[in-house]
Amino acid sequence: EIFRWLHDVDLNSPPADLVAEAIKRASLSGQDPFADARAAVHQAFAPLVRDFVPKVQQSPEPLALAIVGAASANVADALILEPELDLAARFQAGLEAGFAHGEPQVLVDLIKQSKNVLYVLDNAGEVLIDVTLIDMIRSHGASVRAVARAKGLLHDVTVQEAVPAGLVGVVEVEVPVDEMVSDEQLDALSDSKLEEPPDLFATSPGVLGLTSRPASIMLGNVIEAADLVIAKGTGSVGE
């Protein structure tokens, strides 16, 4: 399928568009070429979260520490490129260094003022730290809904990593998943299937990020209702 597509592809298209289309076609054909990479990263983070959660619970500023931890967990990107990386040391260094720009207290204040939070997840493994922050946000009374990716998108976290109770018991992520659909399927989409939006959404195959106008009607409503959006990863665009 990929090679047939390459035969007719417009090589003048932006490289990012070509990569996205190739991944989309692979995922739609039933393949998941990065499943093993996601599983390895996810497994590598499990010991970290077991140590990190007690630190957050015992911290005088638990929400601020959870925020810095969620940012530091983006070391998952480096782990993909450098499998022998000392993940624990790099994560701890991030916790100690804090933000390069700005202060976590700014986000702490925004979270405490928010009632509806949309959290766009980034990488497998990293999500185990993200759910610690999600748990803290919920403890301050806000509703949190998260967005994962469809299978096939590099090491981005998918529903398969986000849903299971294997999230080290940090937070419960509810199903069903409201998947984004193609334009042809929009007419068949009925929000009456769910009385309330689910806590977890999945993007459609080949989607590298999230815009303010997703194909899913229900997710679009969630975006509009959110008074705070925490978007991790470079594929999510504010409009």
Image (cartoon, rainbow, N blue to C red):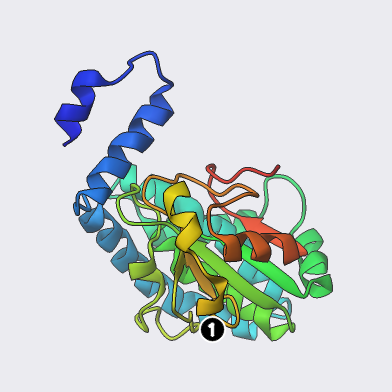
Residue at x-position 76% and y-position 69%: 111
The percent position of residue 116, horizontal first and vertical second, equals: 72, 72
Crowding around mark 1 (Cα neighbors within 10 Å: few <14, some 14 to 19, many 20+) is few
Q: Judge whether residue 64 can be spotted in this image.
A: no
Q: Which amino acid does label 1 sit on?
A: Pro
Q: Is residue 46 above or below residue 228?
A: below
Q: Nearer the viewer, residue 83 or 39?
A: 39
The residue drawn where x is 43% and y is 58% is 89
Outermost top residue: 12
Residue at the image position 32 percent from the left and 56 percent from the top: 151
Q: Using the image as rendered, state which of residue 48 and residue 16 is in the foreground.
A: 16
Residue 213 location in percent, x, y? 62, 49
Q: Position of residue 202 (x, y in %)?
A: 45, 62
Q: Name the residue under label 1.
A: 54
Q: Which of 17 and 9 is in front in this view?
A: 9
State whether residue 72 is above or below residue 142.
above
**Side of 65 where 92 appears, left or right:** left
Number of numbered callouts drawn: 1
Image height of 139 relative to 147, above or below: below
In the picture, measured across the screen, residue 217 lies left or right of residue 167, that is right
Q: Which residue is drawn at 40% across and 60% down?
A: 157
Picture quadrant where residue 176 is located: bottom left
Tell me which corner region of the image, top left, top right, bottom left or bottom right, holds residue 69.
Answer: bottom right
Q: Where is residue 86 in the image (x, y as percent from the top left)?
A: 35, 55
